[in-house]
C-alpha cells in the first residue's frame, strides 16, 4: 500500500498502440488536495494518461495507484474514487439534467436512499438547481453543459477529479464559475486539469506537468519552472526626455544584457530587456539610470515569463533532445 | 452483471422517448393490419390466418429491427457518451446486454400488440360464418415462440451492426443487409436454377438446418426441436460477444 497522503502515484507508465508510443515511461506523484495542470501539445499523451488513470484504458507497462488502489488490479474500485470529465463533455442530449444526474448516480452505485440528496447537492453546488434542473440537455448553453459535466463528476464525492479541457469555449464569467468551484474544493479533492488556456492553468494550478511526445518534460511549480526553462529577469522601463544613452548605461550594469537591436517605433520611450544577472534588482536599476542618464524614469516593471514561454521552452528543449537522440542518417556510398 | 437493471431501465426509457420507436411501431402495426386483412380476404386457404400472418414475419422484421437497434451503440459512440458510461463500474458486456434486452422487450411488445388483430376478428366475425378459430392456441403459441426465439438473433444482429459504426444510417442499412441474408438468403440462393448441381446437393442440407422458414413451419405445427433453439441462442451470444469485442477495441483507443 502507498502512503495515503499521496493521492496519485504513477511509475514508469507506458502505453503503445501497435508501433505508436502514446506515453513512454512517465512517472509522477500528486499529493492529496493538489490542483495539477497537465499541459502539452496536441497528441502529446495527456488524454491517454488521464484515461489510464480513470481505468478506461489499460497501460502497456508500468503502474498507477489512485488513493492507494492499483488501477491495473482494481479498475472498478478506482472508478469509484475518480470523477472524470472527458474533452468536449459528451452528454446524452435527450435527457433532462436531473434525469441524467439520477441515472449517473445509480450507475455509480450511490445507495438508493441517498440519490435524491446527492443529486440536489451537486445541482446546488453547480448552480443548476433553479432554472436548469428540468431543462433538456440539448437546449443548454455550453457553460451550463460544462456545469452538468462537473456535477456528474462530483456525485460520488470523489477523491480525485480529472477534467480534460474543462473551460474550453466558455466565456470569462463561466470560466470564473468553474474556477471558483475548483477553488472551493482545493485541499479536499485532488484535481488534474488538462488545458490549452495557459493563463487559466497558471491561475488555478499548484503545480504543472508538461508532457511532450509521450514523456514528461517538465514538472513543478510555475515559479520553479521559470527559473529552469526561462532563466533571467525581464524588465520594462518607460522614460521621458533624452534617453539616447539608456542602452549604453544598461550594458554597463550587465555587459550580457539582451536588448532588442532597434527601438520599437511605436514605443520609442520604452525599453524591454533581459538580464541573466539575478543580482540586479529594481532599486539598483532605478538608481543607476537616475544617476547616469538625463531621462526621467516614468515606469519600471518586472515582467515574469508567462506559462506560455515556459511551455514553449520546455517542449522545444524536449524536441531538440529527441533530434540529438536520433542517429544521423548516413549517406549511401 | 453490475448495473444491468439501471442500464435496462434507462434504455427502455430512451426507446420510449425516441420517435424512431413510434415510427417503427406504427409502420409495423399498419403493415400487419394490411397483411392480416389481405389474408382474411383471401380465405378460404389451407393455413389458418394466424399461421399465414407469421409466415410473413420477415417483412416487418426487416425494417422494424434496424429502426429499433440502429441508434443503440452508434449514437453513443458518435456522442462520446459511451466513454463516460465506461467510467462507471459498468462493463462493456453489461452495456451491450442492456441495450439488447431493451430492444428485444420493445420488439416483443410490438408483436404482442399485433395479437389484437386476430382477437378483434375473433370477436367481430359472426360465429355462424367462421368455421375456424382465430385464436387456435397451438399455431398461435408456436408462431409467437418462433418470433421470440428468432427475435433474439435478429435483435442481436442489429446491435452488432450498430457497434460497427458511428452513423445510425449506416448501422440501419448494415442491420437490414445482415437480416436479409439471414432470413431470405438461403431462399434466394437455392431458388436460382442455374446453381451448379454440386453446390445444391452438398450445401442444401447445411442451409436446410439454418433455414428460418423451416423453423417457423415446425414451430407452427408444434414441433419444438431443440436445434433451432441452440442455433438462435448461440448466434445471439456470438453477435453480442463480437459487439462487445468491437466496442472494447474502439474505446480502448
Image: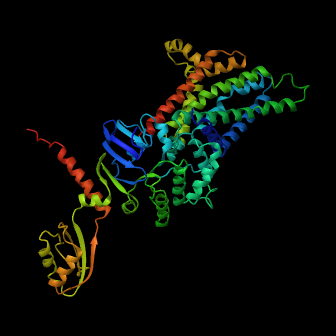
Whether residue A259 is visible to the viewer of this picture, yes or no, is yes
Q: Nearer the viewer, residue B56 or A155?
A: A155
Q: Residue at x 28, y 61 (%)?
A: A309
Residue A97 in the image: above or below residue A171: above
Considering every residue shown, the one lying at the far right of the view is B128
Q: Residue at x 52, y 60 (%)?
A: A143
**Residue B86 position within the rendered picture, expressed as x and y whole percent measured from the top left:** 50, 40
Residue A57 in the image: above or below residue B138: below
**Residue A262 position within the rendered picture, expressed as x and y whole percent measured from the top left:** 17, 75
Residue A111 in the image: above or below residue A33: above
Apparent side of residue B213 relative to residue A159 in the rendered image (left or right): right
The colour scheme of the drawn protein is: rainbow
* The quadrant where residue A290 appears: bottom left
**Quadrant of image for the C terminus of chain B:** top left
Q: Nearer the viewer, residue A318 or A37?
A: A37
Whether residue A45 is visible to the viewer of this picture, yes or no, is no
Q: Nearer the viewer, residue B79 or A105?
A: A105
Apparent side of residue A302 relative to residue A171 in the rendered image (left or right): left
Considering every residue shown, the one lying at the far left of the view is A333
Apparent side of residue A231 relative to residue B212 in the rendered image (left or right): left
**Quadrant of image for the N terminus of chain B:** top right
**Residue B62 position within the rendered picture, expressed as x and y whole percent measured from the top left:** 62, 33
Q: Nearer the viewer, residue A238 or B59?
A: A238
**Residue A273 position within the rendered picture, expressed as x and y whole percent measured from the top left:** 21, 72
* The quadrant where residue A22 appears: top left
Amino acid at each position: 500500500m502507498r502512503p495515503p497522503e499521496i493521492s496519485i502515484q504513477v511509475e514508469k507508465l507506458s502505453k503503445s498502440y501497435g508501433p505508436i508510443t502514446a506515453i513512454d515511461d512517465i512517472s509522477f506523484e500528486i499529493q492529496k488536495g493538489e490542483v495539477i495542470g497537465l499541459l502539452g501539445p496536441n497528441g502529446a499523451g495527456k488524454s491517454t494518461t488521464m484515461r489510464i488513470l480513470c481505468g478506461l484504458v489499460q497501460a502497456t507497462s508500468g503502474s498507477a495507484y489512485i488513493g492507494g488502489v492499483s488501477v491495473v488490479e482494481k479498475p472498478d474500485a478506482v472508478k469509484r474514487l475518480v470523477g472524470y470529465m472527458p474533452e468536449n463533455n459528451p452528454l446524452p442530449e435527450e435527457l433532462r439534467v436531473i434525469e441524467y444526474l439520477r441515472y449517473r448516480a445509480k450507475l455509480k452505485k450511490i445507495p438508493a436512499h441517498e440519490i435524491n440528496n446527492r443529486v440536489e447537492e451537486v445541482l446546488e453546488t453547480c448552480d443548476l438547481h433553479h432554472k436548469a434542473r428540468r431543462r433538456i440537455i440539448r437546449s443548454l448553453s455550453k457553460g451550463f453543459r460544462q456545469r452538468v459535466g462537473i456535477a456528474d463528476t462530483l456525485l460520488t464525492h470523489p477523491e480525485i477529479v480529472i477534467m480534460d479541457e474543462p473551460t474550453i469555449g466558455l466565456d470569462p464569467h463561466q470560466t470564473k464559475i468553474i474556477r471558483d468551484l475548483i477553488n472551493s474544493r482545493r485541499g479536499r479533492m485532488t484535481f488534474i486539469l488538462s488545458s490549452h488556456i495557459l493563463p487559466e492553468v497558471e491561475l488555478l494550478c499548484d503545480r504543472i506537468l508538461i508532457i511532450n511526445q509521450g514523456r514528461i518534460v517538465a514538472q513543478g511549480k510555475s515559479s520553479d519552472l521559470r527559473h529552469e526553462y526561462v532563466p533571467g529577469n525581464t524588465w520594462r522601463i518607460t522614460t521621458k526626455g533624452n534617453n539616447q544613452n539608456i542602452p549604453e548605461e544598461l550594458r554597463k550594469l550587465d555587459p550580457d544584457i539582451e536588448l532588442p537591436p532597434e527601438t520599437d517605433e511605436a514605443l520609442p520611450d520604452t525599453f524591454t530587456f533581459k538580464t541573466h544577472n539575478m543580482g540586479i534588482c529594481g532599486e539598483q536599476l532605478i538608481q543607476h539610470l537616475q544617476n547616469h542618464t538625463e531621462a526621467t524614469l516614468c515606469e519600471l516593471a518586472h515582467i515574469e515569463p508567462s506559462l506560455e514561454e515556459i511551455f514553449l521552452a520546455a517542449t522545444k528543449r524536449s524536441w531538440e533532445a529527441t533530434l540529438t537522440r536520433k542517429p544521423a542518417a548516413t549517406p549511401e556510398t | 452483471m453490475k448495473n444491468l437493471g439501471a442500464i435496462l431501465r434507462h434504455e427502455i426509457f430512451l426507446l420510449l422517448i425516441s420517435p424512431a420507436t413510434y415510427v417503427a411501431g406504427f409502420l409495423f402495426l399498419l403493415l400487419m393490419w394490411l397483411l392480416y386483412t389481405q389474408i382474411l380476404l383471401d380465405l378460404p386457404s389451407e393455413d389458418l390466418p394466424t399461421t399465414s400472418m407469421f409466415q410473413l414475419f420477415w417483412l416487418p422484421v426487416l425494417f422494424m429491427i434496424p429502426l429499433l437497434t440502429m441508434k443503440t451503440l452508434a449514437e453513443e459512440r458518435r456522442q462520446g457518451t459511451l466513454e463516460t458510461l465506461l467510467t462507471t463500474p459498468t462493463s462493456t458486456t453489461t452495456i451491450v446486454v442492456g441495450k439488447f434486452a431493451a430492444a428485444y422487450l420493445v420488439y416483443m411488445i410490438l408483436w404482442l400488440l399485433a395479437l389484437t388483430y386476430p382477437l378483434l376478428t375473433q370477436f367481430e366475425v359472426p360465429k355462424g360464418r367462421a368455421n375456424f378459430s382465430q385464436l387456435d392456441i397451438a399455431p398461435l403459441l408456436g408462431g409467437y415462440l418462433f418470433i421470440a426465439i428468432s427475435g433474439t438473433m435478429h435483435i442481436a444482429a442489429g446491435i452488432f451492426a450498430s457497434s460497427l459504426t458511428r452513423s445510425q444510417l449506416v448501422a440501419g442499412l448494415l442491420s437490414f443487409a445482415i437480416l436479409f441474408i439471414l432470413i431470405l438468403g438461403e431462399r434466394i440462393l437455392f431458388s436460382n436454377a442455374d446453381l451448379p448441381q454440386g453446390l445444391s446437393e452438398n450445401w442444401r442440407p447445411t442451409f436446410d438446418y439454418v433455414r428460418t422458414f423451416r423453423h417457423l413451419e415446425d414451430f407452427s405445427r408444434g414441433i419444438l426441436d431443440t436445434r433451432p433453439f441452440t442455433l438462435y441462442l448461440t448466434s445471439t451470444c456470438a453477435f453480442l460477444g463480437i459487439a462487445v469485442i468491437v466496442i472494447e477495441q474502439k474505446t480502448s483507443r
